[in-house]
Amino acid sequence: MSRPNSVRWLNDVQWDDQGLVPVIAQEAATGDVLMFAWMNREALQRTAETGEAIYWSRSRRRLWHKGEESGHVQKVLEIRVDCDSDVVLLKIEQVGGIACHTGRHSCFFQRYLADGSWEAVDPVVKDPKDIYK
């Protein structure tokens, strides 16, 4: 990531009424969608400056550097916006291969079944008890 010398580009993002934008993290090498999160202006600016994903945690009401506890940071290779500039796509390299707090590669590990239930279809790569000490 290059360090932008101006933050005017942030004005092109369509922020919601809470000052947030939805963000999709996609693994650049595989195309796998790993997670969904939110960013505020500061999170997006810091992501661009540092080259690592920094999100806004709505539950904790603070910035959240992905991997700050687990070590599973996301190295940002590209930042894109959709055609309406109201969704951000991060093309990332997932350090450690685990994006989900459940210890799985992706947060999207549950598949809907015809009987109306959900089935976990991706394995736990590492037990969360071993990740979050």
Image (tube, rainbow, N blue to C red):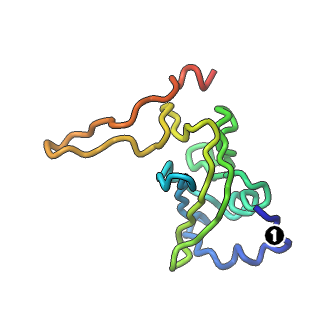
The residue depicted at 63 percent of the width and 20 percent of the height is 133
Placement of the N terminus among the 4 image quadrants:
bottom right
The residue depicted at 64 percent of the width and 65 percent of the height is 79
> Which residue matches tag 1?
4
As drawn, is 29 to the left or to the right of 42? left
Asked if 58 appears above or below 87 in the picture, the reply is above
Q: How many marks?
A: 1
The residue depicted at 70 percent of the width and 37 percent of the height is 68
* Among the 4 quarters of the image, the one containing residue 81: bottom right
Asked if 85 appears above or below 72 in the picture, the reply is below
User: Residue 124: x and y, percent?
Assistant: 45, 29
* Among the 4 quarters of the image, the one containing residue 116: top left
User: Residue 89: x and y, percent?
Assistant: 56, 63
As drawn, is 106 to the left or to the right of 69? left
State the residue lying farthest toward the front. Answer: 29
Along the viewing direction, whichever of 77 and 84 lies nearer the viewer: 77
Asked if 51 appears above or below 21 in the picture, the reply is above
- Badge 1 crowding class, 10 Å Cα cut-off, few under 14, some 14 to 19, many 20 or more, is few
Asked if 48 appears above or below 72 in the picture, the reply is below
User: Residue 31: x and y, percent?
Assistant: 49, 56
Badge 1 amino acid: Pro
Along the viewing direction, whichever of 78 and 116 lies nearer the viewer: 78
The residue depicted at 72 percent of the width and 57 percent of the height is 47
Along the viewing direction, whichever of 21 and 78 lies nearer the viewer: 78
State the residue lying farthest toward the right. Answer: 5
User: Residue 60: x and y, percent?
Assistant: 61, 43
Q: Secondary structure at mark 1?
A: loop
Along the viewing direction, whichever of 22 and 98 lies nearer the viewer: 98
